[in-house]
Amino acid sequence: MPRLGDKLRKLTAQLLDLPKDAVFDIPRFTMIGNVQLYIENHRGVIEFSGDRLKLRLSSGYVEITGKDLVIRAILTEEVFIEGTIDHVYYHA
Amino acid sequence: MQSGIVSLIRGIVRLRVRGDHAETLLNRLVDEHMFVWNVSRLGDELEFDLHLSDFFRLRPLLRETGCRMRVVARFGMPFWLARLEKRKMLAAGALVFVTGLYLLSSFVWSVEIVGNKRISDSEIRRAAEQSGIHPWAWKFRLPQMDELSSRLARLLPDAAWVGVSVQGTRVRIEIVENTLPERRELMNPRHLVSTSDAVVTEIFAERGKPVVRRNTRVKKGDILISGIIGDEEMKQVVVAKGEVRGLVWHEYEIRVPLTQNRKVYTGNEHEKFYLVFGNRALQITGYGKSGYAQEVTLAERSMLRWRNVSLPIGWMTEHTKEVRTEEFQIGAEIAKQIGLAQARADILARFGTDARIHSENILHENMDNGKVYMKVLYEVEHIISTERPIVYTDMEDLETKHNKKE
């Protein structure tokens, strides 16, 4: 059963219509086609190669596979990826 | 962040890093707020772009993660400047060029004068020189435009307005000249005398002394307005000016034949067609003489046009129409009217359009030999004054004659 705190947070988010990624500290993925992917709210790079990128999250990690992946820009909590993106696996 | 202009000024380095914990290095870079972009993996090397200023802080991080790096490319101003240092003369030359250009463009190189028709260029240039505008003048030492304009305007009294503008190294002086009233013609001292025997109807003397009055009879050559004014003691010779109108009798002998000729088209026509090039015409059709005894030729020319411009190429048609003179009779009354009308037109032509015919008297009328013969007397009122210059030698004679009359 989810903790009371989580339930309260969910209720607040719903009532006040706040964005969920800010409230729950989960990442936001903005994907354009399969060529660009912008990930906000990550916690660092675990692995990076031409066809695989693993990013740590506040809880869990996300794995992006594709071809010719290039990190166009990387900031503390944001990363901007270009290339041909095949799969996005979310491990919570 | 990206390779924009600002990043280029700061300097960009492209690195390839080799090692097991390359991703950890990446995270460390991000933690230290060293911007990194275009990150890609080539085999077991990680390639990325980095600012030059951050490059010098890389070493401790590399040691931390146990990675090695090599530089594959450099972009940006710091590298250009380094290269430039080896070519100091180039930099010096560029500097000299820029300074020289600036200095040279701070002079006035040419003075342009626009808009003067009466005032001569050299006069304007002299005035400009006095105000400080001349070639090789320092632009900075010149006073403001409005002060220059007022100075020049004061030096050039014939100018209504002077405008001074500096465009680059050229000073442009615009002049708007005063509009002068029309100059009056020079006239020599003169009397106004009568052209014929007449009875004066109107006399208007603008300058000079009127000698006759209305309803005075004058003879041809009599002085109407004298150019000598004043009395015995003080005399002055002036240009007599004015208008005198008088009633004159004119006798006309008019002859009008009863048989008149008139030209009539017979209807026969001969056409010639030409092509026109500039001023030359090339005949195309209609060769051969027209063979008419009497003819009248009409030519129609049409030129090719393009929009509003006429080209010098076109064609021309000449119509030559045969003409025949026909005789026809007119009645005696009509002949008389024609004659009188002719006489009246002649009067207007000879004595001016402001001549007025007071009366028309047919003194004698005759018809003989197929002709109407009339003698008509017209009483016409028109200008009778004309000028006679005063010559100094005969001034005394005139004076005595003048005095005698009075």
Image (cartoon, coloured by chain):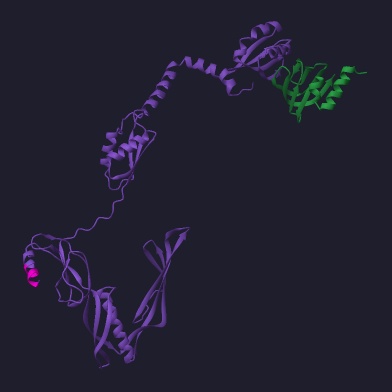
Determine if the magenta segment contains residue B38.
Answer: no
Q: Position of residue B219 (x, y in %)?
A: 15, 76
Q: Position of residue B142 (x, y in %)?
A: 34, 30
Residue drawn at x 86%, y 23% as measured from the top left:
A10
- Chain A colour in the picture: green
Q: Tell me the quarter of the picture where residue B172 sits.
A: top left
Residue drawn at x 54%, y 16% as measured from the top left:
B78
Please indicate whether residue B218 sits to the left or right of residue A83 in the image.
Answer: left
Among the chains pictured, the one given purple colouring is B
Q: Tell me the quarter of the picture where residue B300 sits.
A: bottom left
Q: Position of residue B47 (x, y in %)?
A: 67, 17
Q: Nearer the viewer, residue B214 or B286?
A: B214
Above or below A42: residue B147: below
- What is the magenta range? B400-405
Q: Nearer the viewer, residue B59 or B312?
A: B59
In which quadrant of the rendered image does the N terminus of chain B lie?
top right
Above or below B398: residue B333: below
| Dominant secondary structure (helix, strand or loop) of the stretch shown in magenta | helix
